[in-house]
Amino acid sequence: MHKSPERKVWSENYSEWFRKIIADIPVYDTRYPVKGTAVWTPFGFKIRKAVTQIMRDELEKTGHEEVLFPLLIPDYMLNKEGEHIKSFESEVFWVTHGGTTPLDVKLALRPTSETAIYPMFKLWISAYTDLPLKIFQIVNVFRYETKATRPMIRVREVSTFNEAHTAHATREEAEAQVAQGVEIYSRIFSRLKLPFAKSVRPDWDKFPGAVYSIAFDTILPDGKVLQMGTVHFLGQGFAKAFDIKFMKADGEYGYVWQNCYGISERLIAALLSIHGDDHGLVFPSSVAPVQVAIVPIVYKGKEEEVMKKCREVRDGLESKGIRAILDDRKELTPGNKYFTWEQRGAPVRVEIGPRDLEAGTVVLVRRDTLEKLVAKADTIYEEITKLFAAVDSNLEERSRAWMAERITQVNSLEEVRKKLDGQGGILEAPWCGSRECGEGLEVKVDARILGIPYNEGAEGELGKCINCDKKAEKRIRIARSY
Ligand code: 5CA
Ligand code: ZN
């Protein structure tokens, strides 16, 4: 394992660390005067673009096609599926006027798009040959969140909502697609080097209108859990509410089976938070807005030579598709420039001075460990590519190990409380499976049941329920969460 730079402020005062880093760079400006909304700055937008590109790539590769639906949903459409509207009704923003004229039909700002998309599915799907139908969009959604809002994590305008919706001829096909949805998200998180645990949410905490929900949770530096994404098996509930029928091969008619899955800018919050340290952001090479920062070390008389070499290096890297920048700001010392690019998480910094020119070398510094090495100038591209791979695999290992240390098996409520008050994280315990017991447990330990592990190997003897002493049926995950 590599030595790491300090992560003291990062772990001991994470909320403050996060607020400060997004404001200082800046990444995301929360001073916009509507609660729960914020501005992606030019630097933030570059991060967002790289992340959404990965989402697109993984969804398109697996046969999902991108679409764009309207933001406005008429009230009679939003109200069609009973469970769904019951849960969302308190969170919907409404448009009631066009200018000064009251609207005949109230229009909701989408809180998510089932009720916008499924009436169109009814029009698009008529026979089994139209199935499966797999689409996604990346849009903003609005939720009047009443819990404390938090930058990127709990916002009222979710600006980066990636929702996929699929329709299938049979239950088996739909559930196979649930498994593929889980695979897709696993790959997206892995490409961002983010560790996660997959849980089947308890019945009382599933998506409104779903048969079951699978969630991806990660652990933030303060030990609290963040739900990064969810995959929902919708069964036929929405199909019946929206009358989405199709003709089967045998000429019979039936309702489609549906899924939906979603992720948001929470993923970006996790990306910034999990890899960061006291110097600022740390990025895997694929999403770093600047991958290589070149800092000239200039001495009097040698300026032009050094700058010429720096430009040559930058142009060479750029021509090979690397996002390189030459920091030629005159008023700043090299030290100031190191600070800038460490804060902004450039995976590799290149330093070039007069001595390097003579020796035909460059100095390379990797961001994750801040280790330095001297390379031959004419092998710089190969050396940087190797460093990218080294940074990426270190971030993956480091974050995975960090999370693994925070998933603990426990056998008593006392232990649960002690762990939650200490390092936090996720606790796994034997549980009887009853809702009443589960909800009681949540109150007793002031935490939330995340659910049961999704698709994990057979378990041994479980023993007694941690809360009620009855025979345990399942292993449950408990955490304090965002
Ligand atoms: N229609 C389904 C699947 S697209 C749906 O809306 N599911 S959801 O409610 O679970 O949202 C999907 C994901 O969006 C969540 O897992 C969470 O990561 C993210 N999300 C939800 N609400 C917010 C919010 N207020 N701020 C930021 N992200 C959010
Ligand atoms: Zn119990």
Image (spheres, grey):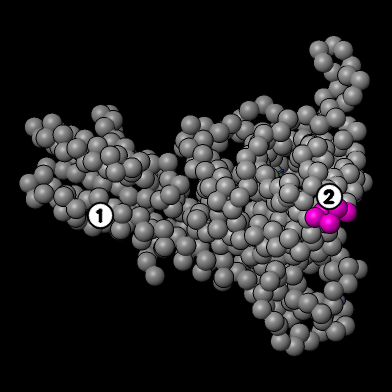
State whether residue 342 appears in this view: no
> Along the horizontal axis of the image, is 44 left or right of 326?
right
The local secondary structure at tag 2 comes to strand
Residue corresponding to mark 2? 247
**Could you say where residue 462 lies in the image, as x and y percent from the top left?**
76, 84
Q: Answer yes or no: disc 2 within 8 Å of ligand 1.
A: no
| Residue nearest the viewer, comparing 401 with 222 | 401
The quarter of the picture where the N terminus appears is bottom left
Where residue 206 sits in the image (x, y, percent)? 81, 57
- Name which residue lies at 59% across and 31% down: 39
Q: From the viewer's side, name the closer residue of 354 and 248.
A: 248
Q: Regarding mark 1 in the picture, which secondary structure is present there?
A: helix
Q: CA distance from mark 2 to mark 1?
A: 57 Å
Q: Quadrant of residue 477?
A: bottom right
Q: Which residues are magenta?
A: 248-252
The mark found on residue 382 in the picture is 1
Amino acid type, residue under disc 2 in the picture: Met
* Residue 27 against residue 359 in the figure, above or below: above
Tell me: residue 460, above or below residue 369. Answer: below
Residue shown at the point (65%, 40%) measured from the top left: 137
Q: Is residue 240 magenta?
A: no
Q: Toward the viewer: 191 or 246?
A: 246
- Of labels 2 and 1, the one closer to you: 2
